[in-house]
Amino acid sequence: MDDYLNGLWFMTGDPVADAEAAGTEGLVEAMRYSLLAGGKRIRPVLALATCQALGRDPDEIMPAAAAIELIHTYSLIHDDLPAMDDDDLRRGTPTCHVVYGDDVAILAGDALFAEGVRLVCEGQGGGPAVQVGILGEISRATGVVGMVGGQYLDIEDAGGSSADALARVHALKTGRLMAAAVHVALVLAPPPAAEDAAYRAFARELGLLFQIVDDILDVAGSEEELGKAVGTDERLGKVTYVSLHGMERARELAAESHARAIGLLDGVDGQVDDLAGIADTAFTRQS
Amino acid sequence: MDDYLNGLWFMTGDPVADAEAAGTEGLVEAMRYSLLAGGKRIRPVLALATCQALGRDPDEIMPAAAAIELIHTYSLIHDDLPAMDDDDLRRGTPTCHVVYGDDVAILAGDALFAEGVRLVCEGQGGGPAVQVGILGEISRATGVVGMVGGQYLDIEDAGGSSADALARVHALKTGRLMAAAVHVALVLAPPPAAEDAAYRAFARELGLLFQIVDDILDVAGSEEELGKAVGTDERLGKVTYVSLHGMERARELAAESHARAIGLLDGVDGQVDDLAGIADTAFTRQS
């Protein structure tokens, strides 16, 4: 994936793009800084694994998978801004705005979004109907009823502090884009309806599992392993699975979610070892 | 256009969207605030006029035209942020971040971008190939070699202070998206190659004309008519057509650009009265 990301035109520049982009090197550097800061790449890996499970060459979904990683990275850059969550450390390195300033960080995020859309338009195979289907999944997952709406609920506490409200914030803020990583492969290689439903339910469950473990690690994880500050949720007074249910119950909820995710893969015909491995990693990870 | 914008799902909400979007009303309000603050709508009007010149019902390009206005509005919201140009007044009203806070303004911009892409995916007619073609035009016009790259050059003075550098900043920052408004209609209803080239040259010229007049009005315009602060360029020490060439020569350059734009329409077969009218308005406007 990193090889692929490194090969994107705005990472290396072809001669034409170079001429058009002259002077924007500092912007591209900021985009590149955050994109290649060593994240887990869970979303693109999920897209590739789903594509494989559907019996297709994972490379076929690579442009859409990379686009989702670009868009995920944009959301991290904007979320870390002083005006938002005000985080100085991410993936073990200073956050984008700490290094490049708030203004360049805002623009780096904006540009990553645009280049993600462009990447699907110019690089994704399968024909226009597949491309539009993928961009529909991505745009729904990132707009008002997706990632950005979820971030709004999070910063405004607009959803309330109940368990349902918490689940909903996370479903929008992180679940939708993670699910979109599965969905884009389903658009490329549609399975029978029952399997499609199982894949989608797996995607939702994985998003939930990921969030519960995130909340646990924010309390119980080590800053060194995580590569970011711990205790952020408590500092910001955020409702989390741990603050709401306690650590012990949160760990049980994670185990239950992991079991459901693995169970859902039984409803699928393909080669799901990699998808199961992603669910295992999401459950057992320490960072 | 305002009727159309008002009818978008996130402006009124259909029952399904309402349930999914519950709690995000404040975000939608901030988007709506900036989108309906009474801008000139030059980009969507340009898309509709081009569609008409190409012999098609202007309504056919309405979703793409509205998407471009959503994206233009997102760029204004982000550009006005304290971390960027720090403008308190826009279109005669306090800017988005002044009313809703920097965090919500950042998210409102992000959401407008996503909803713009979604609108083309879900609302634009002409089939998937047309939709992807339109999103390709829009994403190229808004990424590193477009609007965001141009804004980077502008805030960083990375392009230098020559006349060429100035022209290039504006070509990227405002020219590309304005040109995209013409291009999306060309994607929907492709004319013969020679006419296509004339339309594209007209679009480029109009962007230039618009920018020269913008620079003139920032010095010579009235805050009341413009609905935004004047003298911003000078305060920020920006290179403009006026600072570079003086007011008299800037006015001549605007007249020359207007003449070229009108001349280019001679190379086109269609009903170009509305396009010529837009060029006239761009030249003579006082706000």
Image (cartoon, coloured by chain):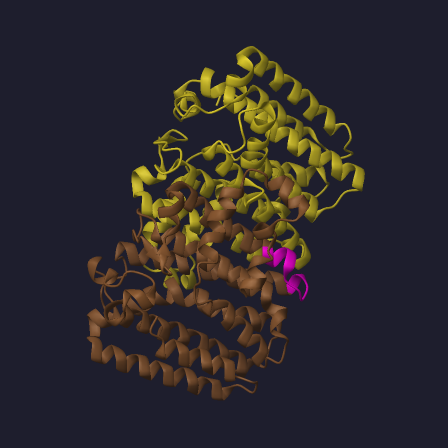
Chain colours: A brown, B yellow
- SS majority, magenta: helix
Magenta-tinted stretch: A119-129
Left or right, residue B79 beside residue A67: left
Above or below residue A281? Residue B141 is: above
Residue reaching furthest to the front: A224
Q: Position of residue A124 (x, y in %)?
A: 63, 62
Q: Position of residue B274 (x, y in %)?
A: 65, 30
Q: Is residue A145 visible?
A: no
Q: How many numbered circles does the render carry?
A: 0
Viewed as shown, does residue A134 lie left or right of B222?
A: right
Residue B99 or residue A221, whichever sits in front? A221
Quarter of the figure that contains the N terminus of chain A:
bottom right
Residue at position x 38%, y 46% from top?
Answer: A99
Q: Residue at x 64, y 36 (%)?
A: B49
Q: Is residue A71 magenta?
A: no
Q: In this view, does A205 lie above or below B54?
A: below
Residue at screen point 37% across, 86% down: A259
Where residue A27 appears, as percent x and y from the top left, is 49, 44
Q: Position of residue A158 (x, y in %)?
A: 27, 57
- Quadrant where the C terminus of chain A lies? bottom left
Taking B166 as reference, is A177 left or right?
A: left
* Residue A257 seen: yes
Residue A39 sits above or below residue B125 on the image: below
Quarter of the image holding residue A283? bottom left
